Amino acid sequence: MEADGSDYVLATVVAVEGSSYRRPGALMLLTANGQRAGTVSGGCLEAQVASRAWWLTANGPTVERYSTAEDDGERPYGSGCGGVVSLLLERPATAGPFLAVLERAFDLRVPFAAATVLDGPQMGRRAFAGIDRVDQGDSGGEAGSATMGNEPMQSLAERALEWRACFEQQFASDGIETRVWSDYRPARPGLWIYGAGDDAQPLQRLARELGWWVSVADGRSHLATRERFPAADEVRVLPIRELPSEAPERLPALGDLRQEDAAVVMTHSFEQDSKILAGLLALEAQPAYIGVLGPQRRTRELLAEAARLLGYAFSSAPAQVERWLARIHAPTGLDLGANSPETIALSVLAEIQKFRKAATALPLRQVRGAHTAIVG
């Protein structure tokens, strides 16, 4: 939109009191022709925000409070939450630099944090941490400068990045107490699917629906094709067949995996799965989540072969296999009664999400405090 000069309003949840479907950091983009992307509630506030956002931001950024309770306060309005949501509404002058950094961090799959002024003449001004600044010069308007020479602001952004947390804090600027909201944005999750069979297709589709970066790799060139996996960010053919049976130094190049990523091994080929597992376990920085499709008995056999490929002595291999087995997720997925490629994909991604967020995977009715936030 900015490339063609289109105007827009960016709405960001900066505070929540009581119950809410969305938490601080949720974004919604409103275009001049009435389109919108993202949500700031469960559907009860979006139309109300859109109807007022343009005139509210006519003179610059503003923070507005929206209640999900009806005027009489007796019944929740729309979503059934009954909470109060504070939104930062802003036009391209201040939102542009933030969206540019957000886009770059999304593409590079790196975390970052932004400290944003929420009141006074500098409202909408930001400092960033964790990513190289993207065209952060004066982007127009008195409050539009995104160049941050303010050390307290920069310190707050760096603290949010270090703590991996969002928080609001006040500090004095030119003798005036100023509210600053520090917003941590984690890296875009990465999912590495090793296996390009039919059951990998819904896994790829659902992961992309969640906004994850997805790679699909397989040693079978007729399966690992862009036509079969059009939504994947990367589709590669692994040189599995060309490898000798024992060559730890020539294990397949599995890609640029990162420690925050997840990998699922599901080629259904013992030769491929064992070599892929050996390659994953040999990485200096292993992905946080390694899952293997299939029964644990088969995974134990795969790990025994991986130990042999990696040169473990016959006497030490069994103990190493047990250590690996305690770390990886085999079988991968949660018990959801899955019996189709689509439900298996849901089961696998549900466990990865649970692992990423250190969640319980219990029904929300059993989780203390779950009524305050349906979606985190």
Image: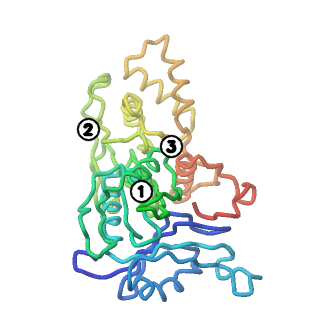
Q: Which numbered tag is attached to residue 212? A: 1
Marks 1 and 3, how far apart at CA: 20 Å
- Residue at which label 3 appears: 293
Taking the spot 54% from the left edge, 57% from the top edge, the residue there is 346
Figure quadrant of residue 336: bottom right
| Colour scheme of the rendered structure | rainbow
The answer to whether one can see residue 223 in this image is no
Amino acid type of the residue tagged 3 in the rendering? Leu
Mark 1–mark 2 distance (CA, rounded to whole Å): 25 Å
Residue 239: numbered disc: 2
Q: Would you place residue 322 above or below residue 149 in this image?
A: above
Does 54 sit above or below residue 219? below
Q: Quadrant of the N terminus?
A: bottom left
Residue mark closest to the camera, 1 vs 2: 1
Judge left or right: residue 69 versus residue 164. Answer: right
Pointer 3 local density, CA inside 10 Å: few below 14, some 14–19, many at least 20: many
Q: In the depicted view, which residue is nearer to us: 360 or 123?
A: 123
